[in-house]
Amino acid sequence: MTARGRAQPTVADDDALPATATAAPPPVASAPATTTAAPSCIPHRLLTDVQLTEYSTHCREVGAVATWIVSSAKYGNGVHQLRDDNAQTFWQSDGALPHTVRVEFPKLTAVHAVAICLSFASDESYTPAKVSIRAGTHENDVAEVAVLDMVQPNGWVLQTLMDDTVTTPSPAPSSSGAPGEESSSSSNILQKPLDMRTASLAISKADSVTTLARHILSLAPIYCTVLLVLIPENHQQGRDTHVRGVKVFGAPLPSTDKLFGGFESLR
């Protein structure tokens, strides 16, 4: 059974982010040692409702323009409950694992991060333990871009998406045309690809929502028309899943672009 729909949850705190240790996987994984292999994706951060609202003031939530499809749904717990901005409601699957949320954009869209609202305290065995995020431009090139392993998460799990294979153009001249000046346009985020380890370290150590947003927006995003949130495993070997919200964040808002001065590289 496939459910379709279009439509957007709430928890509390200030701009300061917690230290890197919590009861479940830490909101931020510790920085990898320089002698270890580079991480396959950037560690996720765990945010409260208030912190995610603050994050939303810096980044455009692009899910509103997309079509949302879930692999199955219990009656009364479908796409609307996934996107209604209410953490007391949830999408509940109604079928065999894996469960999927499919987001289809009308055109190629830059995606910097995906936020997933989960509540192990309320949902226990219905809570995802592992999530695979996949993206592509059409059905045949969808590939995995991030994997989240979680232990009893409560709140918004924010996963950064980064394309570390691209080379972005050198900064364009400023509008004044003065030599040596750089444009403040967010289209020139990086001059060179940022390696995954450096990005992981910066995002893991961000101590405020504003700093976190700045770091995430300084990275080259994933461009896609199809985004999949796939749930292959729940806690306690649960079959069906509860997800209380999913948000997809794209380009910076104009006010953020001006505030951050064009998103300098993390290097």
Image: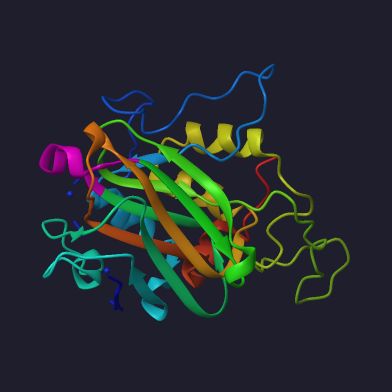
Quarter of the rendering occupied by the C terminus: top right
Residue located at (66% from left, 53% from top): 163
* Residue 124: image location, x then y, percent: 16, 38
Left or right: residue 113 versus residue 144 is left
- Does residue 31 show up? yes
Q: Quadrant of residue 91?
A: bottom left
Q: Which residues are magenta?
A: 118-129
Which of these two is toward me, 190 or 125? 125
**Residue depicted at x 42% and y 35%:** 207
Q: Position of residue 173 (x, y in %)?
A: 82, 70
Looking at the picture, does residue 163 appear above or below residue 147?
below
Q: Is residue 165 above or below residue 173?
A: above
List the single residue furthest toward the right: 179
Residue plotted at (55% across, 47% down): 215
Q: Please indicate whether residue 224 sits to the left or right of residue 119 in the image.
A: right
Q: Is residue 100 left or right of residue 200?
A: left
- x%, y% of residue 191? 78, 54
Q: In the image as oriented, which residue stretches furthest toward the bottom?
A: 106
- In depth, the one of 224 and 72 nearer the eye is 72
Name the residue nearer the viewer: 240 or 227. 240
Is 23 inside the magenta-drawn segment? no
Using the image, determine if residue 34 lies above or below residue 132.
above
Q: Residue at x 60, y 59 (%)?
A: 221
Q: Would residue 57 be visible to someone looking at this image?
A: no
